[in-house]
Image (cartoon, helix red, strand yellow):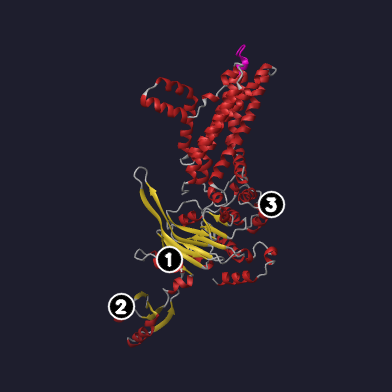
Amino acid sequence: MSSRIFHIAANTFREAVRDRVLYNLIAFALLLTGAAILVGQISIQIERLVVINLGLTAVALFGVVIAIFIGIGLVSKEIEKRTLYTVLSRPVARWEFIAGKFVGLSGTLVVNASCMAVGVFAALLYVSRQLHGSDAWVLVAIYFIVLQFLITTALALFFSSFSSPLLSAVFTFCLFIAGSFAEDLRGFVGLSHGLQHWMAVIAVYAIPNFSALNIINPVAHGNGVSGQLVFWNTAYALVYIVAVLSGAIVIFEYRNLK
Amino acid sequence: MQTSKLLNVLACHLPAETFVTLPPYSVARYNFSVPAIEILGLEKVYHVGFWRKRPKRALHPLSFVVEQGEIFGFLGPNGAGKTTTLKMLMGLVFPTGGSAKILGMDLDDPRMKAQIGFLPEQPYFYDYLTAHELLRYYGQLSGVNSKQLTARVDTVLEHVGLKDSAGVQLRKFSKGMLQRAGIAQAILHDPKVVFLDEPMSGLDPMGRREVRVLIEQLKNEGKTVFFSTHILSDAEALCDRVAILNQGRLRGVGAVEELTAGLRGQVEIVWAGTSVPPSLRSATCRIAGDTVRAVVPSDQQDNIIETLRREKLRLISVTPVRVSLEDYFMAQLSPDQPSAAAANGKAAQ
């Protein structure tokens, strides 16, 4: 990684860390995890299931909210406040700026997810009094959640490279919702014909498949995850992120910063 | 460009070993055979509108050269195209046509970008950073050696008078302090050419004076300073040469004395009374109380004095009219003023 990407990433991380909104969200997520303990205590026999389900959902939801709301401002805020001018007038390529911003926010999200994961495991330990071997799958579920964060960050950055923050937030959020129902869309491909079929096929490939990355429910039921799924989900996320970031870079390379 | 010529001669006659031992601001670091900035037919057309895009010309083809070591003023009213030109030079906006080189290198050349500094108009920096952190960040992006960076940051902060505020977050800075932080980031990596977009904008008289002193210091260090402004007194006091831009067209380029020379050669003649002789009716006369003031070409001065004597009018004074940059500037902004195609040609010579 070029040193310039590293420095831009480090500055992005520092900005996020010093943003009070971030702490509010993390506090709220930890509060929700705490609430899972309470709900777990009144859920006879299914305490663990409730804690894992609610805890991981809180981690995913708040992480995506952070990814969208910080991600949409990564480029547009820098243009609006003209901080970008003093960066790009130095020997910094535009692609390095985009890559640095992505790495910086991704780092922030990984640290957040780690903090919240500690909260989930603490809640789990409190409810079960001990951790089981199957609890290791929770880590895989969190890993998949982090992959969702990275895809969401790439999408927010992509829209932010040519659109206003509000529209970027709307587009990214819509894609997140659509991506959460990607498996249903795949089912629709089999049922549709003609133009509808082809449009559905295009949508299946264009929309990020967040539903494949959501294994909260099986993990909450104590089911394991195959190595093959981990491999293909990782490969899918990487390819999707590279494609989206490439799009963002191409658009940003030719953009007039008025 | 006497200063740059002198520096050039000095640089050529210095022994080779001097180049190793000279301090960072030495003239030997500068290759004066290459102009600092060459702009050739640079133009910009934006396409505005949502559905039906229509062209809007921000800058007509622009050509001029800035020599190394100059303080060059880029003047014009708001919306003249100054910031657009600066943004094109910085690679933030892409030109529709023409080309430009800085220190003989293309605008997208990273080696060139390592040798320039830029202060945008009304700068806003990462306000969650302290002044020290901000400069460290920009130093890292500019490739300043990490071992020297801390010392360099301290030196520059002292240079711009922010040493005592190094640990204060920028969100607590006043406008003047922000402007100084902006200048600090522009000169941090010891660039050869410094671009300042409206550096005195919004500053109080003290702040403006501090910025003027800083610009003069940069020139003394052998740097080229290219700054845009609409505060003409600052430009007149500081600049070796200026270019005047209006509605995207270059209206004139040259030293202030050269530009105003065309408007000189006028005298103001004041006489007692309120009557204006018929032969002077075509001159610009103004009756003020019991005196008449007429501004006339100096070659008509003797004839007019003779006329006043014949008419038995008492002559009070004859004073040469002082032409300021502001007079020239206002003359260039008049709608019937032809564009400086000739000035372009002159600049390119």
Asked if residue A74 lies in the magenta stretch, the reply is: no
Q: Nearer the viewer, mark 2 or mark 1?
A: 1
Q: Are marks 2 and 1 on the same chain?
A: yes
Q: Are marks 2 and 3 on the same chain?
A: yes
In the image, is residue B4 above or below residue A74? below
Q: Amino acid at mark 2?
A: Arg
Q: Is residue B124 visible?
A: no
Tell me the distance, in whole angstroms, between the alpha carbons under discs 2 and 3: 70 Å
Foreground residue among A13 and B53 = B53
Instruction: For mark 3, name the chain.
Output: B
Instruction: For mark 1, name the chain.
Output: B
Tell me the distance, in whole angstroms, between the alpha carbons under discs 1 and 3: 44 Å
Q: Is residue B137 visible?
A: yes
Disc tally is 3
Task: Place residue B346 in its image quadrant.
Answer: bottom left
On the rendered structure, is A159 left or right of A110? left
Task: Place residue B156 in its image quadrant.
Answer: bottom right
Asked if residue A48 lies in the magenta stretch, the reply is: yes
Determine whether the residue tagged by mark 2 lies in a helix, strand or loop. Answer: loop
Q: Amino acid at mark 3?
A: Thr
Asked if the residues shown at circle 1 and circle 3 are in contact, with their CB atoms under 8 angstroms apart, the answer is no
Q: Answer with mark 2 or mark 1, whichever residue precedes in sequence.
A: 2
Q: Amino acid at mark 1?
A: Asn
- Residue B315 placement (x, y as % from top left): 39, 84
In the image, is residue A52 above or below residue A174? above
Residue B281: mark in rendering: 2
Residue placed at 61% from the left, 18% from the top? A224
Determine whether the residue tagged by mark 1 lies in a helix, strand or loop. Answer: helix
Residue placed at 49% from the left, 27% from the top? A179
Determine whether the residue tagged by mark 3 lies in a helix, strand or loop. Answer: helix
Residue B150: mark in rendering: 3
